[in-house]
Amino acid sequence: MSSSEALTGHLSFFHNAQADAKRAYGAQRQAILSVSKAKKALETISSWPNYQATDLHRLTGMAAQANVGQIYYKDESTRFGLKSFKALGGAYAVTRFLQQHLAALNGEEPTMVQLLSGQYKEQLKDVVVSCATDGNHGRSVAWGAQMFGCQCIIYIHRDVSAGRQQAMEAYAAQVIRITGNYDESVRQAAADAAHHGRVIISDTSYEGYTEIPANVALGYTVMLSEIVEQLKGEIPTHVFIQAGVGGLAAAVCGYFWDLWAEQRPRFVVVEPEAANCLQESAKAGELKVVEGDLDTLMAGLACGEVSQIAWQILDQGVNDFITLSEDSVAPCMQALEQNTPSVEAGESAVAGLAACIIGAQHPKWRAALGLNEQSTVLVLGTEGATDPELYQQLVFGA
């Protein structure tokens, strides 16, 4: 797609009448995720080896193409060498669990310096953390487990690529592939963990399981604190954020809602057409499960069940729930590759950007989203080429 060409694709809309910028964020949501709670995550993660803030690009050409004021793109393709924002969440939740586990054993919570030193290796060698994943979350959990010296078992579903499986195995994780879809892999991982005494480090929450997913979301806020610093006081008018179970979307919505209150941007959640559990839940006014194969090129978003704690933020925090057609994914990835500077964006990274551009170029959708020539849009490029073979195929036809 050249700068003179329109990005094609289709969107479906549901405007959330419950969203109101004047509504206070409130104590109930702050108990899940807040700017105050996020400070500990930043303090912890910024002390990890090789931490550095990722780039916030100005996509000036794409903004001109979409006839909006500016598009900011947070580029997570270099995060800790794992090429995904997920590096922040899973590994942080592993960190917090291990600190609490060691505090229960020793009567004192170890510092990050102590945990990284390897001095607890003997106490952690038989601890097993586990999760189900489309790829990136599992890679983060495996990396965290290897960094701190515990064991890791990851469950993947039938559609996860061999490349993503190998990336997790490179961090010494045992990877188990099931024949079902993502949601079935979540249930299998939980059942096996209960039977074998493993600890689930999941980015999705359910009844009775909320603390660890909340820590995963708090890990994501490091990316958001970086964005605030990089924006230097500017507040976007819109945030387009892609969603799977809703953990990242809730982190983004909750953090900016708590920080900016009535000045918060318009939040637009973007999902694949075949895995739109958030949109269906918004339409119904209650949590809904999307059944079926959840077949989408945007593998990291192939989720049919909403995280319960995420929904407590998103149900009244998101202004618009929209879906994006599959045909826009590869052209948007190609456009970013051809951008100056060139941006490596995986297939799950571009949903928010593609939806923004397509929406802005269509008069009806542009009006529905409140986009105009003065709009400042923030999108989150959540991953790079986490599946290098697929990236080459989609971007270069190789």
Image (cartoon, grey):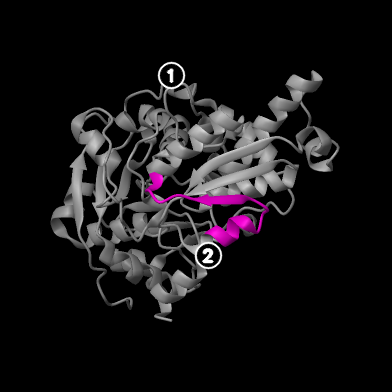
Callout 1, which amino acid?
Gln
Residue 28 image point, x, y percent: 43, 19
Q: Which residue is mark 1?
A: 28
- Residue pictured at 60% horizontal, 44% vertical: 153
- Residue 355, percent from left and from top: 29, 56
Q: Is residue 286 left or right of residue 336?
A: left
User: Magenta residues?
Assistant: 165-182
Disc 1, SS: helix
Residue positioned 49% across, 25% down in the render: 209
Place residue 62 in its image quadrant: bottom left
Asked if marks 1 and 2 touch (Cβ < 8 Å), the reply is no
The residue wearing badge 2 is 163
Amino acid at circle 2: Gly
**Is 175 in the magenta?**
yes
What is the distance, in whole Å, between disc 1 and disc 2 at their CAs? 40 Å
Binning the other alpha carbons within 10 Å of mark 1 as few (below 14), some (14 to 19) or many (20 upward) gives few
- Seen from the viewer's position, the closer of residues 305 and 328 is 305
Q: Is residue 160 above or below residue 282?
A: below
- Spot occupied by residue 373 in the image (x, y as percentages of width and height): 27, 57
Mark 1 or 2: in front is 2
Q: Secondary structure at mark 2?
A: helix
Mark 2 residue crowding within 10 angstroms, few (<14) / some (14–19) / many (20+): some
